[in-house]
Amino acid sequence: MKGLILAAGLGKRLRPITESIPKALISVGGKPLITYPLLKLKKAGIKTIGIVIRPEDYSKFKSRLRFSGLKIEYIFQKLPQGTAKALECAKDFISDNKFLLCWCDFLSPFDYKKLIEEHLNFKPTATILINKEKDPSGSAQVLFKCPYITKIVEKPSKQFSLWGSTGLLALEPEVFSIIPKIKPSAQGEYHVADVLQYLIDQGKKVRFVKLDTWRINVNTFEDLKWAEFKITIEKL
């Protein structure tokens, strides 16, 4: 199994910081934010990891990220067209391997092995980590009927669930054949959530694991402050 981290986002809500540094490289607890999912992937036994970035950020990543025991490959997304298009850039890197997909801003002590084991044991097309939210407006909302996801929508205009996708997913390489079939959002972006919904509509199995601890997706300055606080009192 390979690992893939999406780190080509513009981080608009963290400007002006992200005008000079990619969000994935913002310091949290004295380390670049992306360090935490990288270390969690390594702990889960995944040593070959692709990181999707903007071409202009390559030198910044190379100078700031150095990990022993990991084989890291940088993959370029030239245009910011959403998470599904970022995923599509990694098609050749993933090849015919199962893989664990993670957002670069996903911060949690969750043991990635739990998601991997669920996926390997039951062999669905996708297994996603979900969490019950006080405010799910910033994530893909989901409905489920155990043990499967029945509906997933990226940031819907009208809330329909308190459960949301966290940004950690185990996937089969089959998903790459779906990306060209989905339609862009009103903002012209292609979302992984739409890929998953397409699979569901085609009768494919999308399972879930419920998060059993805290998590932060670092999107705003408030998230950044909360992340710094959590890192100081808890070890990841």
Image (cartoon, grey):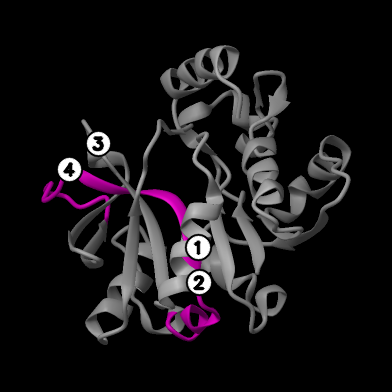
Residue at 82% across, 53% down: 70
Please tell me whether residue 155 belongs to the stretch shown in magenta.
yes
Please tell me whether residue 166 belongs to the stretch shown in magenta.
yes
Q: Secondary structure at mark 2?
A: helix
Q: Closer to us: mark 1 or mark 3?
A: 1
Between residues 118 and 87, which one lies in front from this camera angle?
Answer: 118
In the drawing, what numbered circle is on residue 133?
3
- The residue that mark 2 highlights is 120
- State which region is magenta: 154-178
- The residue that mark 4 highlights is 162
- Judge from the rendering whether residue 64 lies leftward or rightward of residue 81; answer left or right: right
Residue at 45% across, 83% down: 180
Residue 143, horizontal then vertical, whole percent: 17, 58
- Judge from the rendering whether residue 234 lies leftward or rightward of residue 48; answer left or right: left
Give the residue type that dot 3 points to: Glu
Q: In the rendered image, which quarter contains the N terminus? A: bottom right
Q: Classify 216 as above or below 44.
A: above
Q: Quadrant of residue 204?
A: bottom left
Looking at marks 4 and 1 on the same chain, the residue that comes earlier in the sequence is marked by 1
Looking at marks 1 and 3 on the same chain, the residue that comes earlier in the sequence is marked by 1
Badge 1 crowding class, 10 Å Cα cut-off, few under 14, some 14 to 19, many 20 or more, is few
Residue 35, horizontal then vertical, whole percent: 70, 37
Residue 20, horizontal then vertical, whole percent: 69, 30
Q: CA distance from mark 1 to mark 2?
A: 5 Å
Q: CA distance from mark 2 to mark 3?
A: 27 Å
User: Contact (CB < 8 A) between labels 1 and 3?
Assistant: no
- The residue that mark 1 highlights is 117
User: Contact (CB < 8 A) between labels 1 and 2?
Assistant: yes
Q: Classify 182 as above or below 147.
A: below
Residue at 65% across, 39% down: 34
